[in-house]
Image (cartoon, grey):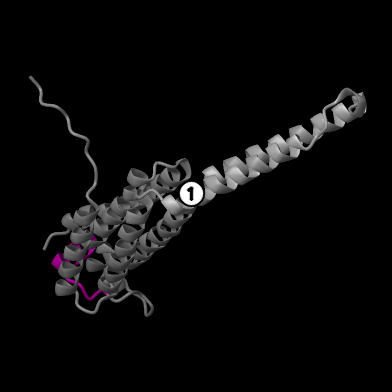
């Protein structure tokens, strides 16, 4: 008999601890490097993301009460206005009926729009907070990619062909391997932080943005691994 499958989900605390551990590894091997500073920025963004996730995961009772109260007032206003209309035949001609129906339909449409706006207000505020952090994650993914752009394994073999403005190759083969590994791990963790938002807020726009970030970081990691493969083919 197969055991019961439990729902798998990312633990945001473990993701944050993994980022912190990676930062320690980067700073120990490459102290005061640009990549180490990027890792610190990622840790700060991930920390803010966890606070946002805590807020997103909770029902905003005050906001809901205000929304429902406004809807209640709008409905009461329409009911009150209807109660003031004199529906007696002598005061209500065919023209009055048409005018009344037109006004009633307009009021109903406006009330429906107001209800939709207030009911979806909480989700839209949460979506806005999520998108803001996701944009930060997308930006830092590009920054990590910038740090690995000049780390070309071929320069280890063709250092004599460098020009005056060629990037300086100061890393050994082992150091370059570790540097590229760290870049790939950072890209993966950026994708994991983004995935936390689609896990806690399954909104279509948020999920789409998360998917874009995951595709972006996967593509960046693929470029890093191509360099690692080339680097491994270089004989010591």
Q: Which of 67/195 is in front?
A: 67
Residue 78 lies, with reference to residue 42, above or below; the image says above
In the picture of the structure, the residue carrying the numbered disc 1 is 65
Q: Which of 26/129 is in front?
A: 129
Say which element carries label 1.
Answer: helix
The x, y position of residue 174, in whole percent, is 14, 65
Q: Quadrant of the C terminus?
A: bottom left
The x, y position of residue 39, in whole percent, is 27, 68
Side of 113 where 193 appears, left or right: left
Query: Image point 80% across, 29% down: which residue?
Result: 101
Residue 154 lies, with reference to residue 80, above or below; the image says below
Query: Image point 32% across, 52% down: which residue?
Result: 191
Query: Image point 31% across, 68% down: which residue?
Result: 44
Q: Which of 108/38 is in front?
A: 108
Q: Main secondary structure of the magenta part?
A: helix
Q: Residue furthest top?
A: 1
Q: Which of 77/67 is in front?
A: 77
Q: Is residue 22 visible?
A: yes
Q: Is residue 170 magenta?
A: yes
The x, y position of residue 41, in whole percent, is 32, 69
Give the magenta part as a residue range.
169-180
């Amino acid at each position: 008999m197969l055991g019961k499958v439990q729902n798998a989900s990312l633990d945001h605390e473990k993701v944050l601890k993994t980022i912190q551990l990676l930062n320690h590894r980067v700073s120990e091997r490459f102290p005061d490097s640009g990549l180490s500073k990027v890792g610190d920025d990622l840790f700060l963004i991930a920390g803010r993301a966890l606070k946002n996730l805590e807020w997103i995961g909770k029902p905003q009772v005050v906001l809901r009460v205000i929304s429902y109260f406004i809807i209640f007032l709008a409905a009461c206003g329409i009911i009150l206005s209807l109660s003031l209309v004199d529906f007696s035949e002598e005061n209500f001609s065919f023209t009055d009926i048409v005018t009344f129906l037109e006004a009633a339909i307009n009021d109903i449409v406006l009330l429906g729009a107001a209800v939709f706006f207030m009911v979806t207000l909480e989700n839209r505020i949460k979506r806005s907070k999520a998108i803001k952090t996701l944009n930060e994650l997308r930006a830092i993914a590009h920054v990590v990619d910038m740090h690995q752009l000049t780390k070309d394994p071929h320069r280890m073999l063709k250092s004599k062909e460098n020009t005056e403005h060629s990037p300086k190759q100061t890393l050994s083969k082992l150091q370059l391997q570790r540097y590229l590994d760290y870049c790939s791990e950072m890209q993966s963790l950026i994708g994991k932080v983004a995935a936390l938002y689609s896990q806690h807020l399954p909104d279509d726009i948020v999920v789409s943005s998360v998917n874009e970030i995951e595709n972006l970081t996967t593509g960046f990691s693929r470029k890093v691994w191509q360099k690692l493969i080339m680097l491994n083919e270089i004989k010591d």
